[in-house]
Image (cartoon, grey):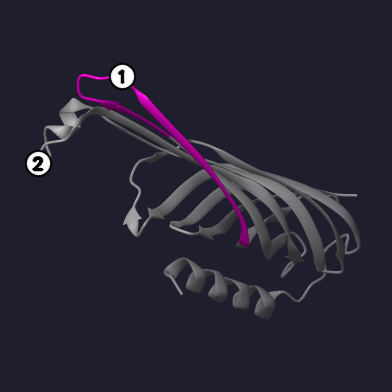
């Protein structure tokens, strides 16, 4: 279990221990959305895939909540991981390379289905927890330019089902509206591809 999962477990334990007050509107439909930043930890064949993360990611969910616990389904776009190398980068290598440039992009998104908890330790303050199945798709695109030759392009797509989990906190503005922040973790693993993506986001929820 990595540090992110330990943090999630501790936070969820704290949520369950301190959540004593019911939500202002305990039963009914809800929708929420979040915009934030992705942070990829990706490995291919056991080797870390370096690069810069895209600046934004977003998620949308809808569900039904009984008292403080409910079910949710949604969609998340986790942005992409991009890496670009040119002749200046290759000049730093202690060995020769047959390429003059390499561009690589890994992007992921998917559908979620799981449980959602919204707890009120006080009348306005809430803490939340969520988790379930993550049905994801990962697309990789690579363009390599061999020295003295034309560009070669490669692409692949992987699909599978793994899991997601998250925690959040914020303020219930009234019985319908909440504003807060979330930390979510999305796990993706298939064959030689192993991705963990941490998403930090600002969230809005509306309860009908």
Asked if residue 107 lies in the magenta stretch, the reply is: no
Asked if residue 55 is positioned above or below residue 45 in the image, the reply reads above
Q: Residues within 10 Å of mark 1 (few under 14, many from 20)?
A: few
- Identity of the residue drawn at 34% across and 22% down: 151
Q: Earlier in the sequence, mark 1 or mark 2?
A: 2
Say left or right for 146 vs 120: left
Q: Nearer the viewer, residue 158 or 25?
A: 158
Q: Secondary structure at mark 2?
A: loop
**In the displayed structure, would residue 126 be above or below residue 175?**
below
Residue depicted at x 50% and y 53%? 197
Disc 1, SS: loop
Which residue occupies 50% across, 41% down?
A: 156
Within 10 angstroms of label 2, few (less than 14), some, or many (20 or more) residues? few
Question: Can you tell which mark lies on residue 95?
Answer: 2
Q: Is residue 136 visible?
A: yes
Taking 24 as reference, is 53 above or below it? Answer: above
Image location of residue 171, percent across then percent down? 70, 54
Q: Is residue 205 visible?
A: no
Q: Which mark is residue 87?
A: none
Q: Residue under circle 1? A: 150
The answer to whether residue 143 is magenta is yes
Residue 54: where, in percent of width, then height? 47, 36
């Amino acid at each position: 279990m990595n540090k992110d999962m330990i943090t999630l477990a501790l936070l969820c334990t704290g949520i369950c221990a301190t959540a004593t007050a019911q939500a202002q509107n305990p039963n009914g439909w809800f929708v929420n959305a979040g915009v934030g930043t992705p942070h990829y930890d990706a490995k291919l064949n056991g080797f870390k895939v370096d690069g810069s993360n895209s600046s934004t990611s977003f998620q949308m969910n809808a569900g039904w909540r009984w008292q403080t616990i409910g079910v949710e389904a949604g969609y998340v776009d986790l942005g992409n991981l991009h890496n670009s190398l040119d002749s200046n980068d290759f000049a730093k290598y202690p060995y020769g390379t047959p390429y003059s440039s390499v561009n690589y992009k890994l992007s992921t998104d998917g559908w979620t289905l799981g449980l959602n908890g919204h707890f009120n330790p006080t009348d306005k303050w809430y803490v939340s927890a969520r988790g379930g199945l993550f049905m994801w798709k990962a697309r990789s695109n690579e363009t390599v330019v061999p020295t003295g030759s034309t560009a070669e392009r490669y692409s692949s797509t992987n699909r599978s089902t793994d899991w997601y989990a998250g925690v959040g906190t914020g303020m219930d503005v009234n019985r319908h509206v909440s504003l807060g922040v979330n930390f979510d973790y999305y796990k993706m693993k298939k064959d030689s591809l192993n991705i963990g993506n941490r998403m930090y986001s600002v969230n809005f929820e509306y309860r009908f």
